[in-house]
Image: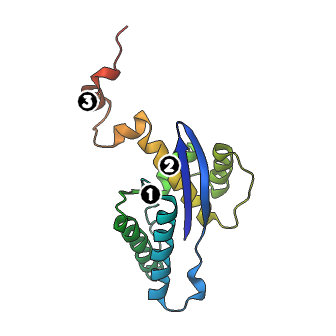
Amino acid sequence: MGYGLIAVKGNEISLLEWGVLKPGKVKDSYKKLQLIFNTVSGLITKYKPDAFAIEAPFFGKNVQSMLKLGRAQGVAIAAAMRHGLEVTEYSPKKVKQSITGNGNAAKEQVWKMLQTLLSFKESPEHYDATDALAVAICHYFQTNSVLGKVSKGLKGWDDFVKKNPQRITKK
């Protein structure tokens, strides 16, 4: 499971921490879930974020893998909710679209764009961490842009104009 935390000051985005939790050495599946819960809780306690975003599960052919993924995501979400954070979920396609402009971008393309956005050169050990970082930045973009606000509770541009008359200028 990857995780990524960013800080935002004004319009500047900076990387706080990113990594991958590997509970593979733990045999008991419930202990793995506890490790996920404790790790997410620890990150929240350490950084005190004001939002929690997660990638929506993608449809897979292996039912057992989907079940395990759903449990892991559920535990991470429960940890966030336990700390009073609002949870937002984004599809993988939405995350890629937000970061690269292409919903079908390869993981390498997403990574290169993250390097540009966050101005660092490190290469990922695992793409799970870059995926998580991309979700964090996607959430920032979606909640801090006019277009992101259009999709939240609005039914298109006509609805946006009605609800935001102060943003309209007449020439």
Q: Which colour scheme is used?
A: rainbow
Q: Does residue 158 sit above or below 91 in this rendering? A: above
Q: Which is more N-terminal, label 2 or label 1?
A: 1
Which residue position is annotated with label 2? 138
Q: Does residue 118 sit above or below 64 in this rendering? A: above
Distance CA(mark 1)–CA(mark 3) = 26 Å
Q: Position of residue 75 (x, y in %)?
A: 40, 74
Going by the numbered disc 1, the residue's amino acid type is: Ala
What crowding class fits label 3: few (fewer than 14 Cα within 10 Å), some (14-19), or many (20 or more)? few
Residue 8 is left or right of residue 52, and the answer is: right
Judge whether residue 20 can be spotted in this image.
yes
Q: Viewer-proximal residue, 44 or 152?
A: 44
What crowding class fits label 1: few (fewer than 14 Cα within 10 Å), some (14-19), or many (20 or more)? many
Q: Position of residue 38 (x, y in %)?
A: 47, 76
* Quarter placement of the N terminus: bottom right
- Residue shown at the point (41%, 77%) measured from the top left: 71
Which residue position is annotated with label 1? 53
Residue 115 is left or right of residue 52, and the answer is: right
Which residue position is annotated with label 3? 163
| Count of marks overlaid on the render | 3
Q: Viewer-proximal residue, 95 or 26?
A: 26
Give yes or no for contact between labels 2 and 3 (Cβ–Cβ under 8 Å): no
What crowding class fits label 2: few (fewer than 14 Cα within 10 Å), some (14-19), or many (20 or more)? many
SS at badge 3:
helix
Residue 151 is left or right of residue 96, and the answer is: left
Give yes or no for contact between labels 1 and 2 (Cβ–Cβ under 8 Å): yes
Going by the numbered disc 2, the residue's amino acid type is: Cys
SS at badge 2:
helix
Distance CA(mark 2)–CA(mark 3) = 24 Å
Q: Viewer-proximal residue, 155 or 3?
A: 3
* Quarter placement of the C terminus: top left
